[in-house]
């Protein structure tokens, strides 16, 4: 109930998920993060600008990959590229 009725009384992480404010979630980022961004002309939730801003805010931690002309489910549309991108990220972030 607090999430809906009293968002100022809940932890910042929970509030940020409800408000869709990645700047709050990632404000103290100190671990590698992979952002896979499906981009399509009719994207109902375009976050390209916000994702680029996060990458620019934390370039040492965030790897940002765009999947052009792709709807929400990247892993179904581009299974080989998705798998390769995730494996590459895991290899590079474990060093």
Image: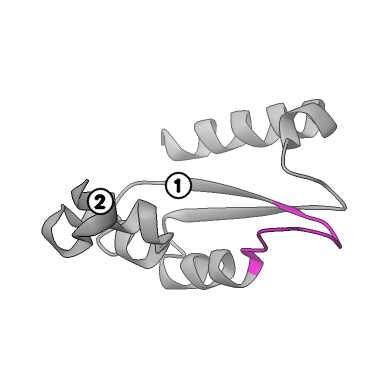
Q: Are marks 2 and 1 in contact (CB under 8 Å)?
A: no
Q: Considering only vertical position in the picture, is 54 above or below 76?
A: below
Query: Looking at the image, is 55 positioned above or below residue 68?
Result: below
Q: Is residue 35 above or below residue 83?
A: below
Q: Residue at x 73, y 30 (%)?
A: 75
Q: Position of residue 61 (x, y in %)?
A: 42, 55
Q: What is the secondary structure assignment of the residue under circle 1?
A: strand
Magenta range: 38-48
Residue ID for mark 1: 33
Q: Secondary structure at mark 2?
A: helix
Q: Quadrant of residue 43?
A: bottom right
The foreground one among 7 and 82 is 7
Q: CA distance from mark 2 to mark 1?
A: 26 Å
Residue 81 placement (x, y as % from top left): 78, 34
- Most prominent secondary structure in the magenta stretch? loop
Drawn side of residue 80 relative to residue 57, left or right = right
Asked whether 92 or 1 is in front, the reply is 1
Q: Nearer the viewer, mark 2 or mark 1?
A: 2
Counting other residues with Cα less than 10 Å from the Cα at mark 2, is it few (<14), some (14-19), or many (20 or more)? some
Question: Along the line of sight, which residue is nearer the eye, 74 or 80?
Answer: 74
Seen in the image, is 57 located left or right of residue 81?
A: left
- Residue beneath the point at 42% across and 72% down: 57
Q: Position of residue 85 (x, y in %)?
A: 67, 37
Residue located beneath label 2 in the image: 3
């Amino acid at each position: 109930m607090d999430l809906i009725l009293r968002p100022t009384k809940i932890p910042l992480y929970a509030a940020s998920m409800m408000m869709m404010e990645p700047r709050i979630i990632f404000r103290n980022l100190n671990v590698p993060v992979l952002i896979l961004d499906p981009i399509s002309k009719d994207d109902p939730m375009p976050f390209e600008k916000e994702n680029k801003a996060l990458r620019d805010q934390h370039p040492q931690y965030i790897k940002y990959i765009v999947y052009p002309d792709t709807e929400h489910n990247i892993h179904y549309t581009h299974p080989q590229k998705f798998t390769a991108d995730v494996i590459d990220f895991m290899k590079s972030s474990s060093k």
